[in-house]
Image (spheres, rainbow, N blue to C red):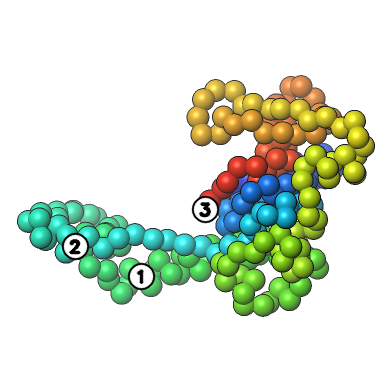
Amino acid sequence: CNLIWKRIQQLKKKSGVPVIAFVEDVAASGGYFLACSADTIVADENSIVGSIGVVASSFGLQDAIAKLGIERRTHTAGESKSMLDPFVPEKERDVKLLHEALGDIHENFIQVVETSRKDRLRNPKEDELYSGRIWTAKRAKEIGLIDEIGDRYSYCQQNFGEDIKFRIFRPLGTGLFDLPFAASASNPFGANEMIENNLLGLTSSLLTHKYKL
């Protein structure tokens, strides 16, 4: 998420083209992180926004493998290489290191939100804002996490004219990111800069898909 956010900032600076993110389902955690790359965030009234936090989860399976008569054998070079191995009891030191990492990532997430939303946030130091909780679009607008309530088509028609059209960009090749993303009808970079267009298209229809950290 952080790399995509940075790249979109670079493209905005280069092109001078404003970016609008549309939340049409869920913009929680990584989804909201990406939405913060936009100048304006518009959300459907039934969308979920927020979850400004970081999570790490696992299982403790040491008792299960003991009952099955399974012996765990792990060999490492480096004291922390196998930290938080789910097949051995948790170590206090490992948990402390994990929380330090989560805290650092959380701080970066908060910085991105505050940099992007600036004076639009209401009570930005409020504990709940960065607690990882979620909000509906109505409440998210009240506290400044989004700018408008609406949808892609009505917002664009209202702000850019009834005749606005959307162009679909599909990245070449196969893989995780081979998804259609909608962008505005204009193409400010030219046909030879498809990669940059794809990134802008990703931003324009940023939250029609779900993203998680």
Left or right for 20, reference 88: right
Q: Earlier in the sequence, mark 3 or mark 2?
A: 2
Is 136 above or below relative to 158?
Answer: below
Residue 180 is situated, as x and y percent measured from the top left of the image, at 64, 30
Q: CA distance from mark 2 to mark 1?
A: 17 Å
Residue at image x 32%, y 72%? 93
- Secondary element at tag 3: loop
Left or right for 124, reference 159: left
- Tell me whether circle 3 and circle 2 mark residues in contact (CB < 8 Å): no
- Secondary element at tag 2: helix
Any mark on residue 213, and which? 3
Q: Earlier in the sequence, mark 1 or mark 3?
A: 1
Residue 176 is situated, as x and y percent measured from the top left of the image, at 51, 34
Of all residues, the one furthest to the front in this rendering is: 46
Q: Which residue is mark 1?
A: 95
Left or right for 95, reference 165: left
* Foreground residue among 161 and 170: 161
Any mark on residue 62, and which? 2
From this viewpoint, is residue 41 visible? Answer: no
Q: Around disc 1, counting alpha carbons within 10 Å, would you say few (fewer than 14), some (14 to 19), or many (20 or more)? A: few
